[in-house]
Image (spheres, coloured by chain):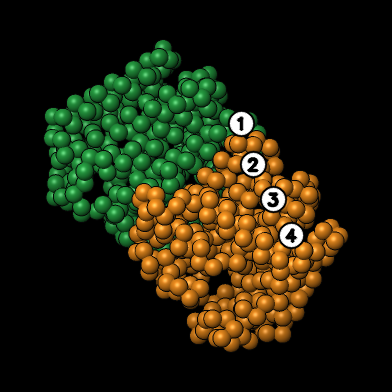
Chain colours: A green, B orange
Amino acid sequence: MNFKSEMNEKKLYIDSELDRFIPAESEYPQIIFKAMRYSVFAGGKRVRPIILLASCELFGGDVDKAVPFACAMEMIHTYSLIHDDLPAIDNDNFRRGRLTNHKAFGENIAILAGDALLSHAFEVMSKAVADNPEPALAKAMYTIANGAGVNGMLTGQVVDVISDGKKLNKETLDFIHINKTAAMIQASFKAGAYIGGGTQEDAEKLSMAGCKIGMAFQIQDDILDVTGSFEELGKPVFSDERNQKTTYVTLIGLDKSKEKVKTLSDEAIDILKNYGDKAGFLIELTKKLIDRKK
Amino acid sequence: MNFKSEMNEKKLYIDSELDRFIPAESEYPQIIFKAMRYSVFAGGKRVRPIILLASCELFGGDVDKAVPFACAMEMIHTYSLIHDDLPAIDNDNFRRGRLTNHKAFGENIAILAGDALLSHAFEVMSKAVADNPEPALAKAMYTIANGAGVNGMLTGQVVDVISDGKKLNKETLDFIHINKTAAMIQASFKAGAYIGGGTQEDAEKLSMAGCKIGMAFQIQDDILDVTGSFEELGKPVFSDERNQKTTYVTLIGLDKSKEKVKTLSDEAIDILKNYGDKAGFLIELTKKLIDRKK
């Protein structure tokens, strides 16, 4: 199967399982299920769950066993976007060309829809673990909880929020990128490795690859803000400069930022290459994620 | 040991374990750990975690194995209070005589502190499950996730929010009480039973007792609003009437509400009595919870 078909197949599988895991809009009280589904089915690329499934397959694991964890990963990602967009945090009115959750459903429902997705992610995972008490599944769940919480994404978001409008040093910027973005990419690789039957060493290696990919992805975001066009990105360019936001580009310049992306990307691919031909899909995905124009 | 000493001993144990599970205020970024701790250590009675520990002991289980789940229960309870108090939801400035979390730390940090406590609850539980792959622990975690999420507390909160200012029928009021309040009491009993080594039937029986206790507790709240005094409650009385809030008292009157509390309480105690003398502590606790003046 070629890369594009495999991406598409995985995305469709994840979408159909998300649809199965999240209660229908017709259930009572409808508004919360509408709000959860509005943001989960808003056109996300499913990068994290696809990585989790592919990482599981890298070790010959069964994707059916991994899919509740992959879907939980997407629910957690979506909750974080809904809460980030709230008036008290980023105060964004649009995401992916649609009204943000609180603009569509009101701030109270948006707060609760985020809470609901975070809770539901753990309900889905803990059900999978309770139904199949394989140690690897419990480890995968812990890995994801760890990536999402105060040792990961949540803390990155806190530092991002309290840094608003301040000039940052590279250490703080790295802290934000590593936690806010990379932690969940790492967790996707690592959880997938556990479920697939990889060793602790495999899980750590893939986690390291995930960290490099997450960092490269985020720096590429900073680069696109100055090199991309509104048409390509679907959002205003030079927004970081206007908002006086510290980015890799403002800290070390455009050329060095591009070099950094290249180095991180090469290092991540080198780790993946250790797994031979089976890693082809993940290597291709890494390239697509980093060499993107939007 | 008498009831009061046993309550106190359990509360101290839970407090010291919560202190151990939640990162210190000195850790980076300090503000989130300060905000989490501000609300967790705001003088809560630890009712849910105490029930969980006592329910575990009822089956001869080890409280050390149950305590991560008990603490997680309190973290989830606290997250729900922080988010309930937010300007977009109940807009409360005070809780237990202190500023609410968003009044003390700002709305952005309060949203994230709630998210952090919910995430951390699941991180603590999933670590316990990963460290000890006993099926009972995974079942306990699923029970708690289920009680907190879209099949429990969260949905109760949603219906409460969308019912604001509306006249409710008894069915809707019961839905709110069963989900918003009783679901987490039920989960405490049920999770404790699993961890302690109770059978599925035991877990279901205790869950039923928990549902009745949760309902009685909530109706007692409605009663105290019209029979209590400001001094006893530490909050304004007749607030439900002023806010034109539908309560058991407005729906079926004071006398019938008192009868209902008595019936529910008796039924719950009858279930607990099946476990003989060992259930003495839980029976006493049930009485204290329901026959309270504040």
CA–CA distance between discs 4 and 3?
22 Å
The amino acid on which the numbered mark 2 sits, given as a three-letter code, is: Ala
Residue at 79%, 50% (x, y): give it. Answer: B59
Is A153 or A70 nearer to us in this picture?
Answer: A153
Q: Which mark, by number, is residue A241?
A: none
Dot 4 or dot 3: first in sequence order is 3
The amino acid on which the numbered mark 4 sits, given as a three-letter code, is: Met
Is B289 or A100 nearer to us in this picture?
Answer: B289
Circle 2 Cα neighbour tier, 10 Å, few/some/many (<14 / 14–19 / ≥20)? many
- On the rendered structure, is A169 left or right of B94? left
On-image quarter of the C terminus of chain B: bottom right
Can residue B6 be seen in this snapshot? yes
Residue at 49%, 36% (x, y): give it. Answer: A143
- SS state under label 1: helix
Q: Which mark, by number, is residue B208?
A: 4
Instruction: Pinpoint residue A93: horizontal percent, then vertical percent.
Output: 28, 55
Q: Which residue is mark 2?
A: B138
Q: Which residue is mark 3?
A: B63
Residue A48: quadrant of the picture: top left
Instruction: Pinpoint residue B11: horizontal percent, then vertical percent.
Output: 63, 62
CA–CA distance between discs 4 and 1?
31 Å
The amino acid on which the numbered mark 1 sits, given as a three-letter code, is: Pro
- SS state under label 2: helix
Residue at 14%, 46% (x, y): give it. Answer: A241
